[in-house]
Image: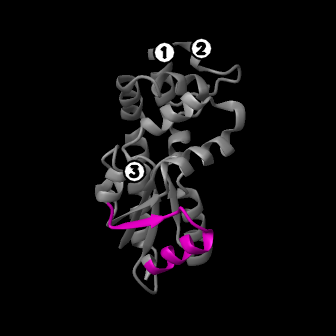
Amino acid sequence: MRLIGLTGGIGTGKTTVSNYLARTHNLPVWDADIYARRAVEPDSPVLDTLVDRYGSELLLPDGSLDRPALGNIIFHNLTERRWVEAQIHPFVRDRFRENCDALRKTPSPGEPTAVLAVPLLLEAEMTDLATEIWVVYCSPEQQKRRLIERHGSSLTSAQIQARIDSQMPLEEKCRRADVVLDNSSTLEVLYEQCDRAIG
């Protein structure tokens, strides 16, 4: 079974790559961000644990998580970020294991292959779930520009930098990668690299 651990930095283009692999190569993509959101759905044990620690001001009127409020806590405090991640990551890991078990049992003409899209693949020490690691890279200037374009005026420059700084440096991720996808040029160039890496 081939399990591609797809990661990179915030704003480097992981979603662009995962969408391409799903669309063009018909690969299942398991997105850690989706599972992380499920982990903190209203009335979930994880959300209850967060509220116990930070108080009910972490909740919106409908009982759902106030993500910006949590972001203000975890992107400025390493200890709190690690604590929150320790609550969410086991749930995410369990979903990946369930998916792997299901893929193993699914008849396939070739080698079963899936993409694990995990922004914190290395930071969360989930590399054991993948058979290879792909890192999407771009320059720090491009990374900041893309985040500004994505978030507009909803995040300050300092908040954007805090999110970048909260992750392992891209250079370190690239050193630990089996495949580095350079997303500093055109989409066509990026997709060509994806095609070569898939083989």
State the residue at coordinates (39%, 71%).
Answer: 104
State the SS at label 3: helix
Residue occupying the far bottom of the picture: 109
Element carrying mark 2: helix
> At x 49% / y 56%, what residue is drawn?
138
Crowding at dot 3, Cα within 10 Å, few <14 / some 14-19 / many 20+, comes out as: many
Residue drawn at x 46%, y 68% is 114
Q: Percent position (x, y) of residue 117?
A: 48, 56
* Residues in magenta, as a range: 177-196
Disc 1 and disc 2: Cα gap in Å? 8 Å
Spatial separation of the CA atoms under disc 3 and disc 1: 31 Å
Q: State the residue in front, 184 or 57.
A: 184
| Disc 2 target residue | 57
Q: Is residue 42 left or right of residue 152?
A: left
Q: Is residue 172 above or below residue 195?
A: above
Labels 1 & 2 near each other (Cβ < 8 A) = yes
Q: Which residue is mark 1?
A: 54
> Disc number at residue 170?
3
